[in-house]
Amino acid sequence: MAESAHAYVRGNTVRFYDWLLSDAVKGTLPEGPAIWICGDCHTGNLGPVADIDGNIEIQIRDLDQTVIGNPAHDLLRLGLSLAMAARSSDLPGVTTALMIEVLMEGYLEALTGRNPKTALSKVDPIRKVMRQSQARTWRHLAEERIEDVTPTIPLGRRFWPLTADERKHLKRLFNKESCDQIARCIQGPQLEDGKQRVPKIELLDAAYWMKGCSSLGRLRFAALIGVGKKKNKEYRLLDIKEATHAAAPCANSSDMPANNAERVVTGARNLSPYLGDRMLATTLAGKQVVIRDLRPEDLKFDLAHLTQNDAIAIARLMAGVVGRAHARQMKRSERVAWSRDLKSRHTKGLDAPRWLWTGVLDLAALHEAAYLEHCRRFALTQIG
């Protein structure tokens, strides 16, 4: 998180939630319809995502914090992330002001169905990543994640050996019934002799996955599996991650599953169906876990060294992605009412609503100070 202010914002979600729940903020934000929101809607959590057939769209990529809540929270989190990305690219403050303005424009366009998609050909950093996504294969994913294309996971800094109990629990997870469920998620039923059959899968190798802050204090495994018969076997890499309680503020709703793994998968299927359909909620060693099929096409955007024009276009595009994710859950009357509420909050001389602009300003100042203090403590540990 010491790499940049933007990296600090991406890695420190709790500070954002603490600000949302503070007395100074209560009652100042619009209340949209209670829907599934990302909960941690920063730029690193949006990117190209593939469905089980290989179709690619830009959708939300990480749903650990998804809850039924206020859609305004996603807009604020995205606005903060975009502002800090502009700051990390050394762009002037006027760029941030323009980004926040087009963020609301892009969101409203997607919410109302008016020309919701920004042309990717006009946004160079986005176009490059989309081209990479479309060209990637299993070999790219294997070399990136497990450093080789052979059906083993190399142990080392990122992958740790399993304990005897962990290996036992993983073997139990891959019983016949679970394998059928996993196979349907990652590939769907296959036609064989005119009949639909679920492809056979087998566990080939597994390791504990030390993958950044999100791995700390919870179960996290990488599982390498074989899919299909020997001569036509394909390899897939599964991310098996413990689902914990969401820190994101949520609405009081009986529609939100109490089981955290089911919450993550249900939120994903509502917000990011390409990804959600490749996820499965289950239990492992008594813990609630989410199994996610990793695809080579799934990538994140690197928003370093942006130009002003690209930064503004990216803000509109990403806001449109979030707007479509929200809109597909709302009835027409809800979309109209929420759009009208957001438009009514614009003030003279400012094309973005006052609550959004002042919220991003407060959050940027808060995170900038916290980032510098984090860097000071990090530097002291390096000297020591």
Image (cartoon, rainbow, N blue to C red):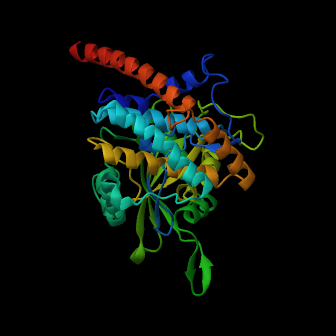
The answer to which quarter of the image holds residue 210 is top left
The answer to which quarter of the image holds residue 20 is top right
Residue 302 in view in this figure: no
- Placement of the N terminus among the 4 image quadrants: top left
- Residue reaching furthest to the left: 383
Q: Nearer the viewer, residue 380 or 158?
A: 380
Taking the spot 35% from the left edge, 30% from the top edge, the residue there is 93
Q: Nearer the viewer, residue 96 or 131?
A: 96
Side (left or right) of 326 relative to 150? right
Q: In this view, does 40 lie above or below 377?
A: below
- Residue reaching furthest to the right: 254
Q: Which of 214 and 276 is in front in this view?
A: 276
Q: In this view, does 211 lie above or below 113?
A: above
Taking the spot 33% from the left edge, 18% from the top edge, the residue there is 372
Residue 228 in view in this figure: yes
- Placement of the C terminus among the 4 image quadrants: top left
Side (left or right) of 177 relative to 125? right
Task: Return the x and y of residue 376 as percentages of the image width and height.
Answer: 30, 15
- Residue reaching furthest to the bottom: 193
Task: Return the x and y of residue 317 as percentages of the image width and height.
Answer: 45, 51
Picture mark count: 0
Taking the spot 31% from the left edge, 62% from the top edge, the residue there is 139
Q: Nearer the viewer, residue 317 or 378?
A: 317
Task: Return the x and y of residue 91 as percentages of the image width and height.
Answer: 29, 35
Q: Is residue 204 above or below residue 214?
A: below
Task: Return the x and y of residue 348 as percentages of the image width and height.
Answer: 54, 32
